[in-house]
């Protein structure tokens, strides 16, 4: 069977700065894979290439057998930082509804009107799934960091994606909520492939099956093979490893 | 104020002015709300000022200045939008340059217009009392165009003004809708130029929507309140300026500015009070407004 996501010999540079070099990566259907590495090592760039927001200078990327742009409607994405102002006049419900954009593009106008009710159902189903149904009417600016992250997750899920991509989804929230969100991702993994960028190798090792270490180049490890030596090689200096119990 | 209403019943030019103010307020409320939430006031300012180039050229070649304004506004919107989308490094400098070049072209054309005794001031600061009745149909047509586009594509516009990156991932042609939005801003600028002139247009485009944004938290309601507020401010400014014979455009803008400053101070005070209540009573019912 062909891999769900396949990168072959991908190179990428911003202006004169090479960020990724000779990246090969294959992600199988149903995998839960972590992407780790030092700051400015190319993690977010790698995600943006898979999402089709950036185009590699060389190499090929296929997602679900198509180009990233063609596959983008089957990908759910949760960014590291919200790229919108927090005081934007919009409710949680409306934010999640935007995740349905493009989902009905192939339907006719009448068919879309017919589906208005089911769109609302989809929004509430996604919000309930991330345990945020109670805040559907709240303003986006009144949410805590953890609540906002759940809403962004619901926005990514509402279009029923086959692949879920998250860029440090728990970077700005406390550890208790971080565990709750990763427990949720574990459940979602039963029906979709998940790629998650994290700065905390030890923490995500308890959840993901495989870790892709990115620092301009990419090396994959099974989580049970991650040890101090691997991390030291990746970060290029001594890094203290803290074991988490879940 | 009585004198204004008496005159309004009597003089058709005043009735035309009130209708023009109300027609302009539709564009000001609907498109002004996008300008405020997308924070593109500088871009809207660039479009508004470069319109003088088109007005000057129209005067020079003997066309209706409003038609010249519309063509120049759309060209400026597309140029500035293209700069914003493709030339990030010097975006503000280039927009500033287009702003100034448009004005310079307009002033040169007007200066060289044969036998033309144009009142440059009425282009710059507007004169709603001189709006000819036939211009009202032109304004109605512009409003219809605005409302049709916003009605047809409101979800796409919301996606683009809220989160461009996510909109792109959902397959929305972000560049196209961004440029279309700027073209609608251009159309609105032409609508508002009749009322306050191109120098002051930016204030009427942003202040009513910004005031609405202090109190409501949905883009649709913001548009509705900004439209009503724009109409009330324009007609009130017209009424206030009538008796002492003040220029109408600056009176409207001063009124809008005063309402905005008062509203901004009030909303700051209200938010501060709310935060204090939340700190004093973290388990209480105090919630941020909205």
Image: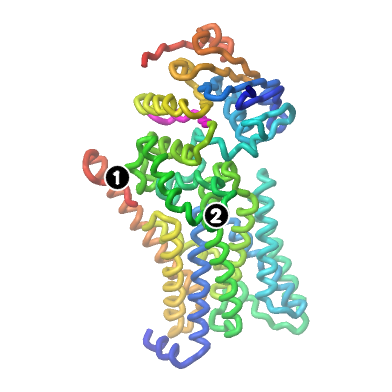
For the question of whether residue A53 can be seen, the reply is no
Q: Mark number for residue B275? A: 1
Q: Nearer the viewer, residue B66 or A168?
A: A168
Q: Is residue A56 magenta?
A: no
Query: Residue B178's x, y, as percent?
Result: 61, 53
Q: Is residue B161 visible?
A: yes
Q: Quadrant of residue B40?
A: bottom right
- Please provide percent x and percent y for residue A192: 50, 29
Q: Which residue has dot 2 on it?
A: B157
Residue span colored magenta: A164-174
The x, y position of residue A212, in whole percent, is: 57, 18
- Position of residue B14 in the picture relative to residue A65 (left or right): left
Query: Which numbered disc flags the more N-terminal residue, 1 or 2?
Result: 2
Q: Label 1 vs label 2: CA separation?
A: 33 Å
Who is closer to the viewer here, B123 or A111?
A111
Left or right: where does residue B112 sit relative to residue B189? right
Mark nearer the viewer, 1 or 2:
2
Residue drawn at x 56%, y 71% is B144
């Amino acid at each position: 069977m062909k891999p769900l996501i396949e990168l072959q010999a991908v190179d990428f540079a911003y202006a004169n700065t090479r960020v990724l070099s000779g990246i090969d990566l294959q992600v199988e259907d149903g995998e839960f894979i972590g992407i780790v590495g030092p700051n400015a090592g190319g993690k977010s760039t790698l995600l943006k290439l898979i999402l089709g927001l950036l185009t590699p200078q060389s190499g090929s990327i296929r997602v679900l057998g198509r180009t990233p742009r063609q596959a983008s409607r089957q990908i759910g994405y949760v960014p590291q930082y919200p790229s919108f102002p927090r005081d934007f006049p919009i409710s949680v419900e409306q934010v999640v509804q935007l995740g349905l954009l493009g989902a009905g593009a192939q339907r006719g106008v009448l068919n879309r009107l017919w589906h208005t009710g089911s769109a609302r159902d989809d929004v509430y189903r996604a919000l309930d799934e991330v345990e945020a149904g109670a805040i559907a009417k709240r303003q986006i600016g009144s949410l805590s960091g953890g609540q906002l992250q759940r809403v962004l997750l619901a926005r990514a899920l509402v279009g029923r994606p086959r692949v879920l991509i998250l860029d440090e989804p728990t970077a700005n929230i406390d550890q208790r909520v971080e565990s709750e969100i990763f427990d949720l991702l574990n459940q979602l993994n039963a029906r979709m492939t998940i790629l998650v960028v994290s700065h905390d190798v030890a923490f995500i090792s308890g959840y993901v099956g495989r870790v892709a270490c990115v620092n301009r180049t990419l090396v994959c490890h099974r989580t049970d093979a991650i040890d101090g030596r691997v991390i030291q090689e990746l970060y290029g200096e001594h890094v203290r490893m803290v074991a988490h119990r879940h | 104020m009585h004198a204004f209403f008496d005159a309004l019943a009597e003089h058709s030019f005043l009735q035309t002015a009130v209708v023009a103010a109300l027609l302009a307020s539709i564009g000001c409320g609907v498109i002004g709300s996008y300008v405020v939430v997308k924070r593109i006031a500088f871009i809207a300012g660039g479009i508004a000022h470069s319109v003088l180039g088109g007005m000057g050229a129209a005067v020079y070649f003997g066309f209706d200045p409003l038609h010249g304004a519309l063509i120049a506004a759309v060209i400026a919107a597309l140029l500035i939008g293209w700069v914003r989308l493709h030339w990030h490094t010097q975006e503000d400098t280039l927009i500033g340059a287009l702003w100034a070049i448009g004005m310079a072209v307009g002033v040169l054309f007007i200066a060289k217009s044969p036998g033309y005794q144009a009142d440059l001031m009425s282009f710059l600061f507007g004169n709603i009392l001189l709006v000819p009745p036939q211009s009202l149909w032109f304004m109605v047509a512009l409003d219809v165009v605005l409302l049709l586009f916003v009605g047809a594509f409101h979800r796409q516009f919301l996606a683009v003004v809220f989160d461009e990156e996510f909109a792109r991932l959902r397959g929305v042609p972000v560049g196209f809708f961004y440029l279309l939005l700027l073209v609608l801003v251009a159309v609105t600028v032409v609508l508002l130029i009749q009322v306050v002139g191109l120098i002051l247009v930016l204030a009427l485009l942003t202040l009513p929507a910004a005031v609405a944004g202090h109190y409501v938290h949905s883009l649709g309601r913001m548009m509705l309140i900004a439209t009503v507020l724009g109409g009330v401010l324009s007609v009130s400014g017209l009424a206030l300026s009538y008796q002492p014979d003040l220029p109408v455009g600056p009176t409207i803008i001063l009124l809008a500015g005063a309402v905005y400053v008062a509203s901004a101070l009030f909303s700051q005070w209200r938010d501060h009070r709310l935060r204090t209540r939340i700190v004093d009573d973290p388990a209480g019912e105090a919630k941020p407004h909205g």
